[in-house]
Amino acid sequence: MVGKVLKRTYVVLLFSFLYIPIAVMIAFSFNQSKSRTLFTGFTLDWYAQLFRDDAVLSALLLSIVLALVSAAIATVIGTMAAVGINRMRRGPRGVVMTLTYIPIVNPEIITGVSLMLLFVVVKAGLTMLVGSDSWLAQNLLGIPSLLIAHITFNLPYVLFNVAPKLRQMDYRLYEAALDLGCNSRQAFFKVVLPEIMPAVFSSFLICLTYSIDDFTISYFTAGNQQTLPIAIYAMTRKKVSPEINALSAIMFVVILAIILIANYRESAKNKKKRHK
Amino acid sequence: MPRKRNPGNGGQQAATLLKKNKGVATPYIAWVVVFTALPLLLVIYFAFTDRDGAFTLSNLTGLAGYASVFFLSLLLAVIATALCLVIAYPISFMLSRLRSGRQGIMLMLVMLPMWMNFLLRTYAWMSLLERNGLINKFLGLFGIGPFEMINTAGAVVLGMVYNYLPYMILPLYTAMLKIQPSIIEAAEDLGAGTWHKLTRVLIPLSKPGIKTGITMVFVPSISTFIISKMLGGGNFWLIGDLIESQFLGNSYNYNLGSAMSLVLMVVVLLIMSVTGGFDSEDIEGVI
């Protein structure tokens, strides 16, 4: 009896701890005044203001484009790598996998500053070689460096998702395709790729979320550019504005919707399978 | 052309397949060499040179002056990791014992806050903990406080626990899923009380999850610079803040910053050699 009460209390406290901060933010996004403690009346003004905020909108656009492009490139390079590494001998494969672990294991700030050092050094080198007015030297730290950084931290996740799927695959399918007259390229696109497509697609989605969510690594490699998390950081350092609450509320609802849809589709798929 | 089914040619054929396929990993290998290995080598190079590129140890020896910052970072990270473990352990066990349908929903509810950007989550606590914040207002109703909560070490630890708790829950839950109910029942049948069930059965069997969880909470906690900035108000400089100030802040000294990064990396590696890092299997659910 006592145990049950204790258990209930613990669960309630834990979920309060997890959700009260978010609930308070969402509630105060509808608050008329700027107060963070007194609710003075309902308004949607902060949402309207948010959608007129050019800094936030352009940061959002950059984040979305960056996520799509970096996820696409990482997925392609990573899938190719998974195929190649799967066929490698033990020794070289070990070396490559250790290198793959580094961005996951290393603190993000180290990945960030180490990439920043690389870009700064390359920029200095370019300036020395071709002069400071070269386009690349002037623009390297910004969108190009962000793109490279995002691909770099996304690649391990593609490998870790696709490689197990490849190992599960029946290798004889590939050989059968070769026997039936495919060249290795055709065999890959017609047989192997459809087989591993779910893992490839989920890697792409994972990369999207990591890219949109990343602050630390972007912060060190963005130059003057602002991604959405960097814009959020700038907002938290400026004067208090309930705009940030409105942004949180929107993000929470969007994330909730995505997760619910994903879960719903998953369970629908499972049901279908069972009926078969 | 020899017939494919000929067993004598199997090895040779595999070898040609191998050759054909190996090339596709080349772009990736080039990528990790240039953008993962080379930047880390640059960190090491900068840590051991001065502004003119001459070899020096002064960056590393100069770190002695920052010993208190390193100590504070270590202390706060250890406290946050311990708190996460204690808070996460029961819920992970409960999750692993639920019926599979409810398990999915509950797990989703536990992980949902993590999907919000951590700057927003930390900002939420900023406004809650303020001197005129909601918590102090609430306590004031009972005539308690107001307390100085924001800009304290406690607030920084709270931020770490709030942000990284799911990283502890998930590996623990994954490890506990593998514990058969019959094993716990057997322990009960053999007369084990709650304490013995925990210390003799559950903890030993969930050890892989504990190790992974500790790594996954400790590493971001000891290297954060945002949580300490937002909730510590600049009163509590951690290693992350030091490094950031050398690269983007006022101090602006890449060589010193690299030396600090190098030490942080060594600390993290040491911790991982104790905890054994993490298995790729354990982080499957996370990534």
Image: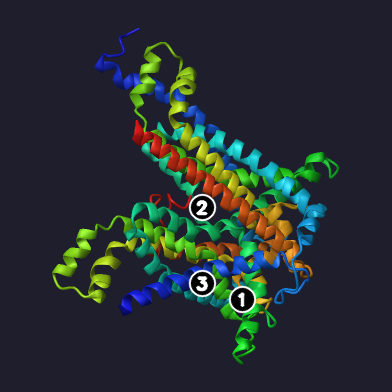
Q: Do labels 3 and 2 share a chain?
A: no
Q: Mark 3 points at which residue?
A: B77
Q: Which of B108 and B234 is in front in this view?
A: B108
Q: What residue type is labelled 2?
A: Ile
Residue B68 sits in quarter: bottom right
Q: In this view, does B124 lie above or below A138?
A: below
- Near mark 3 (Cα within 10 A), the count class, few <14, some 14-19 or many ≥20, is many
Q: What residue type is labelled 1?
A: Tyr
Which residue: 47% across, 73% down?
A13
Q: What residue type is labelled 3?
A: Ala
Regarding mark 1 in the picture, which secondary structure is present there?
Answer: helix
Q: Name the residue under label 1.
A: B66
In the drawing, does residue A273 fall left or right of residue A150? left
Which residue is at the far left?
B190
- Mark 3 or 1, nearer chain start: 1
- Is residue A122 visible in this depiction of the protein? no
Coordinates of residue A93 in the picture (x, y in percent):
42, 39
Which residue: 37% across, 34% down?
A273
Coordinates of residue B165 in the picture (x, y in percent):
49, 65
Q: Do labels 2 and 1 share a chain?
A: no
Q: Name the residue under label 2.
A: A104
Q: Nearer the viewer, residue B3 or A39?
A: A39
Regarding mark 2 in the picture, which secondary structure is present there?
Answer: helix
Chain at numbered mark 2 = A
Q: Which of marks 3 and 1 is in front?
A: 3
Coordinates of residue B205 in the picture (x, y in percent):
28, 62
Report, in whole angstroms, how far the alpha carbon at label 2 lies from the one at label 1: 27 Å
Q: Which of B74 and A175 is in front in this view?
A: A175
Residue B271 sits in quarter: bottom left
